[in-house]
Image (cartoon, coloured by chain):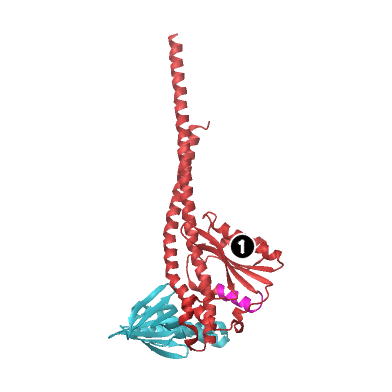
Chain colours: A cyan, B red
Amino acid sequence: MADRIQLEVVTPTGPVVSQEVDIVTAPGVDGEFGVLANHAPFLSTIKIGVMTYKQGNTAEVLMVSGGFCEVSNNKITFLVESAERGREIDVDRALRAKERAEKRLAAAQRKEEAISQTRAEAALQRSLARLKVSQLGK
Amino acid sequence: MASLKDVKSKIGGVKKTAQITSAMNMVAASKLRGAQSKMEKFRPYAAKFNQAMGNLSSGMDSAQFPLMAVRPVQNIELVIVTSDRGLCGSFNANVISSAEKLIKRYTAEGKKVSLVCVGKKAIGKMKKTGLVRKQYADLMGSFQMFNARAIAQDVAENFLMGNTDQVQLVYAEFKSVAVQRPTTVALLPIQPAASDAEVAATSTGDYLYEPSPDQIMEVLQPLYLNVMVYSSMLEVAAGENAARMSSMDNATKACKDIIHSLTLVYNKARQSSITAELMDIVGGAEALKG
């Protein structure tokens, strides 16, 4: 087990993943990064997006939204606001959310309301990430 | 002595009350289970969060972050978290009275106090003080993190604008099902728990940061406030139901005691009326004989 890393994904509603994996890739704020076993201590913020992890031949895909991750002592811990697997995602709902967010974004751009624009952008990113995960997770 | 009918209707009334209180007890018990499991699921998140926060801040100069700025304290804000409903013993009263003590102390020290009330009980009690800046009702029970975020954001903005120099969180800590203790914790300026020796030995300086530590800190600090507010709300939600459970249990017991003593009264009244009737009959028979 020396070349595996312990992955923990923790959200406010409870732990989602806790297992040893070969590789983790995650959406960092400055771009996607991958973490293998025995990685140096590392701390990064996570943006809304898709994270994947592999153990042997099985790969899993998760939709994660904002938070951060910490690597130390061959253990990678994600603290994110939410984490969802592909099969847990309601595609219709995500599609509706996407349309709604796009409409709001267009409206916000016309009126130039900064706050609602950032919120709509976040909602749009979340729905896009959900759709992507639901496709990949099939 | 009360008439037979009066006593009987009183017994019926008390029985109905006992039914209601025991139903409330059961409802509170099941709600408590929900709240407790939410709390237990949230704990690992909060614990890891605080640990990471401690790691990160131990190597940093706190003065550069506006949310950590320590200013001479002129204005204090108290965020009081109570439940929305009553009938849970002294649960809310304890929190409110400890908040009132703080208000008194700070006012005596010449500091200005403003209040943010979460939960209807705090709102109702604190209205007359005229210090309430913001109030939030009907947030309990839904356990949505965005509720906590709204409060945390508002408090942080107020702090950043310089309207308050210190923010404290007053709530009831959930020690156990039997014990909920009012507690006060400092919310702003942020002073993360000093990382313990074991953590300090393994970490800090040799971490790689992406983006820079400062930028990470800027993301984490608002999150930290969310976590603090949210966990206090969870504790209050669990504590409220625990307190209601035990107070309703007591009420049911008291009802049973009353029913018992009323039944005694009823039986005595019934017996004495029978005796009186018998005396009448015997007296009548004697009179006829005579």
Q: Residue B135, position in %: x, y?
A: 59, 67
Q: Residue B210, position in %: x, y?
A: 48, 89
Locate the C terminus of chain B and report the quarter of the image it occupies: top left
Q: Which residue is farthest right?
A: B110
Name which residue type carries label 1: Ala
Give the camera-side residue of B268 and A8. A8
Question: Does any portion of residue A100 appear in the rendered image?
Answer: no
**Image: magenta residue range:** B151-163
Give the labeled residue for mark 1: B99
Q: Quadrant of residue A89?
A: bottom left
Give the camera-side residue of B43 and B78. B43
Q: Is residue B159 left or right of residue A72?
A: right
User: SS at mark 1?
Assistant: helix
- How busy is the neighbourhood of tag 1: few (under 14 within 10 Å), some, or many (20 plus)? many
Would you place residue B56 above or below residue B117 in this image?
below
Give the camera-side residue of A134 and B155. B155
Q: Which residue is farthest left?
A: A57
Give the camera-side residue of B253 and B101. B101
Q: Main secondary structure of the magenta part?
A: helix
Residue at the (47%, 78%) spot, across then down:
B199
Q: Is residue A27 left or right of residue A22?
A: right
Q: Is residue B153 magenta?
A: yes
Q: Quadrant of residue B214?
A: bottom right
Would you place residue A91 above or below residue B147 in this image?
below
Residue at the (64%, 61%) spot, across then down:
B101
Q: Residue B165, position in %: x, y?
A: 65, 74
